[in-house]
Amino acid sequence: MPKFYLTTPIYYANSRPHVGSAYTTIVCDVIARYKRMCGYEVAYLTGTDEHGVNIERAAEKLGITPAELVDRNQQIFRDLWKLLGIQHTHFIRTTSAEHARAVQTLVRRTMARTPDAIYKARYEGRYCVHDNLYVSDSSEPANCPLCGRPAELISEENYFFRLSAYQGKLLALYRDHPEFVQPDFRMNEVRSFVEAGLKDVSISRRSIKWGIPWPDDPEHVFYVWYDALTSYLSGIGFGQGEGGEANPSFKKFWPANLHMIGKEIIRFHAVYWPAFLMAAELPLPEKIFAHGWLLFEQEKMSKSKGNVAYPEPIVKALDELTGAKVGNDALRYYLLRETVFGQDGNFSRDALLTRYNADLANGLGNLASRVLTMIENYCEGIIPDPGNATVPLRIHELASQPHRDAILSSYENFEFSDALTVTWAAVELVDKYLVEEKPWVLAQKTENRKQLEQVLYSAMESLRIVCALAHPVAPESTQRIWSQMGLQGALADVRINQLQWGDFKPGTRIGKPEAVFPRVDKKEAWERIEAMENEIRNPAGAAPKPAAEPAAGAKIAIEDFAKIELRVGVVKSAERIPGADKLLKLLVDIGEEVRQVLAGIALAYAPEELIGRKVVIVANLAPRKMRGLESNGMLLAASADADGKPVLCTFAEDIPAGSKVK
Ligand code: ME8
């Protein structure tokens, strides 16, 4: 049996998964189910990324240990995957002993096979703890390009990986295997990045305790990306048991056929990872596919931005309201149908509910119940024999091999939306066929019996094929229709690439027709989902957050606000600071004195347009040094998002400098 090994990224265990996180896992589950139906033995790995400074800090804030935090959070991931019916075969935790062994084995192997690949040196640079990203290799202040937060200064002795030595090998890999990174436009980005030259990367930390110790040098722990990427090996047995590096499961499944990831982590997967593997002399994965983001109002859905939707309320609310198990399939169908896979897509609860009612309740569900009811009423619940009658041309085309193969090739190429569009076009065609042939009229005259049987057989056979083709995306509901059609066994065991028109055996007794996708009232569903989401955001009985660090959206007392001294200022002079693109140096008159204030607004305002402008300044902020200059206060500005253009707060009416703002 051929094998197929695919992976999701190993999820950060510092917060609960949202619909954006579930997107990657759902897509991989669709691929895994599809591949199984093509006859592959599938290994599907997911897991949790549990080390690193952001976990350490998140735990500290909650007053628990990092181990307690990740124990708790990894369970939330497992529970969600269970609820969503994800059929992963392997789950790796980066804090497990097996994983630590694998990471140490990999680095030892690397040092043995390519002795100059790893060396010790001093690292100085800016690092974003939130995204675990080296922002710059200089000590100058810098903001993280992903989240916009100021990056932290790091200076310490580290182990480095000689990435610079892999530029030629990586470019050769991209040239010889253009399918290594997909979609194509992502391959172009990766190639340009590597062509511009590669710097060596630090792969250990001394300042962090919460990590895997470096072999024979336990003061260092592994940098989280080296640690996390190795999960793809440890998760299937690398470094485990008797076999060690030659563990039988690892030998069977490695190299991975597919690493499915989100677009923001492509550099780690398409540049670092193959270089790490080359240095360790291990085979490279076959393909890395970087999908787009699910956006919420045009921004990436992320907990830190507070614009998240969670999967549980959608699934549970739809199940409850319909009294049927439809929520999972509704979410999966919506996510895969609505967005061209690879591009960013907007997540909308409204669009999900519309799709549910239109495509699932009125579309597939309605067709199934119509056809089954007619078999029940006109054929005593037995699949009729179409005899030698020729299948009507259009229906035959729909279920013919080229049609089936077009859908299969869309699955192969991860064009899920296309696969579903074509499958659902078939649903419409069969609906139209029934309207034209009018079996309810044919049933009235015995001389039309043969024709009636042929029409109903064709409709049932089309439904069987549609169910099989839609099964990877809508596994639970298609299985229910399958059983109602009187078909035995698991639909998952059907070989999707061997579906043949005419395989439905006449004489089969159908089961009891029941609504598979009851319609939902959109308003009611919306409200139910909203209420459940609110419970997740503000769980009843949740311990209040410590007063010193109010959570986003939490209230503060008036006394807290009174601690901040806000004053009206007038800008007297403004100039750029050489070498700092974003900063302006301003002199601001705040009534009794003129203050020097540095403000990160240079990309939004020219110095000359600020002179004489009234601004709001935080007057009692402790002085801070930036670029060797002191800043005594802060200007207030609004921006639409973390990376958005700052817009200074000002006044519509006149007001003297130094006036208090309260
Ligand atoms: O990156 N839309 O973990 P992670 C689409 N631990 N996909 C999204 C998304 C959104 N709004 N938000 C998150 C990490 N994802 C590392 C991986 S692998 C060796 C280490 C996706 O929990 C994201 O793109 O931040 C990624 O594919 C996955 O969720 C895990 O993200």
Image: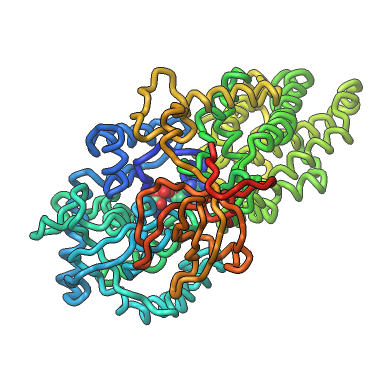
At a point 42% along the width and 28% down the height, the residue shown is: 559
Q: Is residue 223 left or right of residue 471?
A: left
Name above or below for residue 18 compared with residue 278.
above
Query: Is 392 situated left or right of 383 in this image?
Result: right
On screen, residue 648 above or below 110:
above
Q: Residue at x 53, y 61 (%)?
A: 601
| Residue 50, horizontal then vertical, whole percent | 29, 44
What residue sits 47% from the left and 51% below the top? 592
- The correct choice, above or below, for 573 with respect to 239 in the image is below
Residue 86, given in percent of the width and then of the height, sits at: 45, 37
Work out whether residue 609 or residue 383 is closer to the camera in this orientation and state it. Answer: 609
Please tell me which residue is depicted at 22% across the width and 36% down the height of the picture. Answer: 65
Please tell me in which quadrant of the rendered image residue 363 appears. Answer: top right
Q: Position of residue 221 (x, y in %)?
A: 19, 55
Judged from this view, the residue extending furthest toward the left is: 216
Q: Nearer the viewer, residue 554 or 156?
A: 554
